[in-house]
Amino acid sequence: MRADDLATMPATQALLVEPGTVFEQCFASAPSCAPSRASILRGQYPHNHGVLRGSEKHWGFSLFRELGNETSNIATWLHDAGYRTGLIGKYLNNYPSGAAPNYIPPGWDEWIGVTNGGYEDFELNEDGTLVAYRMSDHPYQTDVLSAKVADFISRTAASDDPFFLYVAPRAPHAPASPAPRHQGKFAVAPVPRPPSFDKPGVNKPSYVNAEPPLDVKAVAKVDETYRTRNETLLGLDDLIAALVAALDAAGILETTYIILTSDNGYHLGEHRIVAAKGTAYEEAVRVPLVIRGPDVPSGRTSALASVIDLAPTFAGWANAEIPAFVDGRSLSPILHGDPAVWRHALLIQLYRDHPDIVEGPPAFKALRGDSFVYVEYDDGFRELYDVTVDPYELDNLAGTADPDVIQTLSERLAVLATCAGAECRVIEDAPIAGQ
């Protein structure tokens, strides 16, 4: 889900955005689902949790489990703090490969995990029992998950136990497929054409320069993808409305934090990238983050946030112990007043260690600040953008900027790309000369 997808979800606007805080600068730890989801669960950058994705060796669930990440994450922390924990939806890529078909990770009291399938033909592990939902019965995954969310809330609220529920629908993951009731809702909606649409820009990396101008067929694919994705998100919008209604009916809406975010963004023709993720550009790395809850003000903040901040934020709300390995920080200081110190930059990483991966960008490390993004690719190419004056990242300044500025950014990126735990926060908080 892209950050700007929020604008097409009316219930979410009314129920979360208007009464909550919108983080306008929240970023994925990687523009790829498995590494970013592992970061959400562990509060770590990919180089520390180890789920790098670039090959089978560095794939999602099996490696997350193999590395011992399941023994300590937001589920185990909150479970040990007395919370009833539940997961409904997608866990990590390739779950449950390498484990028993009905495997349930530690720390989760209730588990409804998607094991395979798409929007209309899928299987769920429902607390250890595999249940198939077949197309012939006309299920729709988002709606099935929505009903289970409402059921979890009503049952758990009745017990007065504090709870943590991780809801992870497929929507709008490709190939997007809207519920029948939403098909055609965006059929005539105008498709955004930002200045970067079908334009690579100046001094771009070779993988961008290699993209041909968008022909009629490519533009049609962008348009269809945009409309289908947004129709699919209307099902998620309905889920959010049902979730809020269930909390309200249980009498706990005003004492519950609700967080909406995503694991990565998506290109829709920007820089001639038709429909893909995996880049260092804003479309792929900027994600929505909206928080509604007790004493959370209505408004927006430009404070830099990352998905690595979610786990320590949840743990802080629950008074759970936060392990020393956590790289991220609680977002509460932003929600409840201006902190004396906040990060000046954060890290975004993409690993490409498989020889068969030839499409898309090479591996990169990126330093994202309040007003800039600096990228170093493994092939030696560099990018630098002033996103205040060039928000669409069309003019790469890396070749013309002051060499001392480039050196400063490169040194900061190098130490952040190898940091761990509290060291990451210290590095992030240090001002950057010239920025």
Image: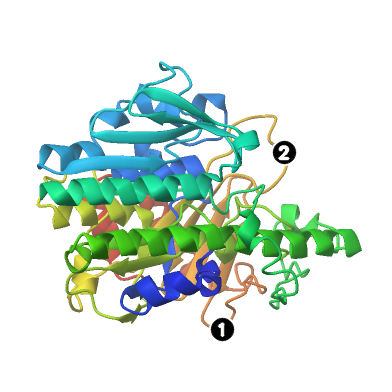
At horizontal 59% and vertical 79% (from top left) the residue drawn is 390
For disc 1, the marked residue is 389
Of 434 and 425, the residue lying toward us: 425
Residue 232 at least partly seen: yes
Expressed as whole percent of the image width and height from the top left, the position of residue 99 reads 41, 17
Expressed as whole percent of the image width and height from the top left, the position of residue 378 reads 59, 45
Q: CA distance from mark 2 to mark 1?
A: 32 Å
Expressed as whole percent of the image width and height from the top left, the position of residue 308 reads 33, 52
User: For mark 2, does the 10 Å Cα neighbourhood hold few (<14), some (14 to 19), or many (20 or more) residues?
Assistant: few
Q: Quadrant of residue 172?
A: bottom right
Q: Is residue 99 above or below residue 299?
A: above
- What amino acid is found at the position of numbered circle 2 in the picture? Val
Q: Is residue 203 above or below residue 375?
A: below
Q: Quadrant of residue 184?
A: bottom right
Of 97 and 308, the residue lying toward us: 97
Asked if the residue at tag 1 contacts the one at tag 2, i.e. Cβ–Cβ closer than 8 Å, the answer is no
Residue 44 at least partly seen: no
- What amino acid is found at the position of numbered circle 1 in the picture? Val
At horizontal 69% and vertical 64% (from top left) the residue drawn is 227
Secondary structure state at the residue bearing disc 2: loop
For disc 2, the marked residue is 358
Expressed as whole percent of the image width and height from the top left, the position of residue 357 reads 68, 35
Secondary structure state at the residue bearing disc 1: loop
Q: Is residue 324 left or right of residue 420?
A: left
